[in-house]
Amino acid sequence: MSLLTFRRAKPAPARGGDLTVRASIEVMPRTAAKVDSFAALLPAGTRVYIAHIDGTPIDEMVATAKRIAAEGFAVMPHFPARSIESRAQLGDWIARYQGEAGVKEALVLAGGIATPRGDFHSSMQLLESGEFDRAGFERLHVAGHPEGNRDIDADGCDAVVRDALRWKQDFANRSDAAMALVTQFVFDAAPVIDWARTIRAAGIDLPVHVGLAGPAKLQTLIKYAMACGVGPSLKVLQKRAMDVSHLLVPYAPDEIAAALESARSAEPRLGLEQAHLFPLGGIAASADWLAARHPVQHSAAR
């Protein structure tokens, strides 16, 4: 006889505020291939990031961008510096994305491998190459690190990350492209809010797009959080895992979204512009969560 004879009722998602009303979402070519129609899941114009995992052929990336753009979405592919072998290859990728998929936006980041494959090791090198500006890109996003980044600051401090932010702010002041900071997914609002206050005090005024993990099983989230180096907010998941009842229903980011929306309302200068969803439990689950929070906005896609 099972000891777990009860089932907790799944709470209805709270109606969302401005932080999630225009939320972007991230996909990979292999996960996008499993979606019959993005237009049936997301409102037209939603920004869809296409994650470039090292080793993914550029043909697959461009084909995914072309397909999603054709369904009426703003496509923002990743450009991982350490996976790009040369300036010529960077120019080729840009030309292919533009020529075949009409791409005008990019997430420029260092990438997830330790050893560069060629000439670039940082997002700053890609930006200062001038290739994006010459191609007329209208929007360039870069990474923000509310919980630090051990790959950049191995000592656990944030000196290098902070210097990089100042450089990116200066570049934004010189570039015609709109820029924003996009964070890794987090599970606690407090580190994000504290970080936003700190960078504003340092003169960084780039808008912040906060990464949230979409609905997923708790075990799945813990696995991804550990693999991606999520920092202090991992404790939120670990504490949740100690309550067996929480293992019976998927995690959803309602609490952190509400806390961030409260901070956004109370302190507009924080620049918490919108949420960016990592659909760790599947694209459909994240789309359903957004639709429940903003039913009018999503009704046309259903």
Image (cartoon, rainbow, N blue to C red):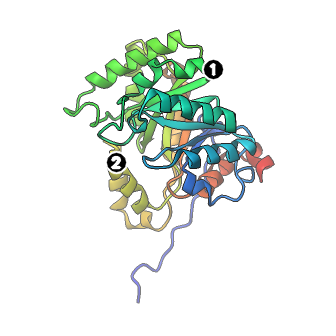
Residue 204: in sight, yes or no? Answer: yes
| Residue at the spot 42% in from the left edge and 78% down from the top edge | 4
| Residue at the spot 33% in from the left edge and 21% down from the top edge | 162
Judging by the rendered image, the residue that carries numbered circle 2 is: 234
Residue 24 lies, with reference to residue 246, above or below; the image says above
Say left or right for 12 vs 267: right
Residue 22 versus residue 257: which sits nearer the camera? 22
| Residue at the spot 37% in from the left edge and 56% down from the top edge | 222
Position of the C terminus by quadrant: bottom right
| Residue at the spot 59% in from the left edge and 14% down from the top edge | 176
Q: Secondary structure at mark 1?
A: loop
Q: Secondary structure at mark 2?
A: helix
**Percent x, y for residue 267?**
51, 22
**Percent x, y for residue 282?**
56, 58
Residue 42 lies, with reference to residue 124, above or below; the image says below
Residue 187 lies, with reference to residue 149, above or below; the image says below
What's under tag 2, amino acid-wise?
Answer: Leu
**Percent x, y for residue 159?**
26, 22
Residue 166: name its quadrant: top left
**Percent x, y for residue 247?**
43, 66
Judging by the rendered image, the residue that carries numbered circle 1 is: 136
User: Farthest residue toward the bottom?
Assistant: 1
Q: How many marks?
A: 2
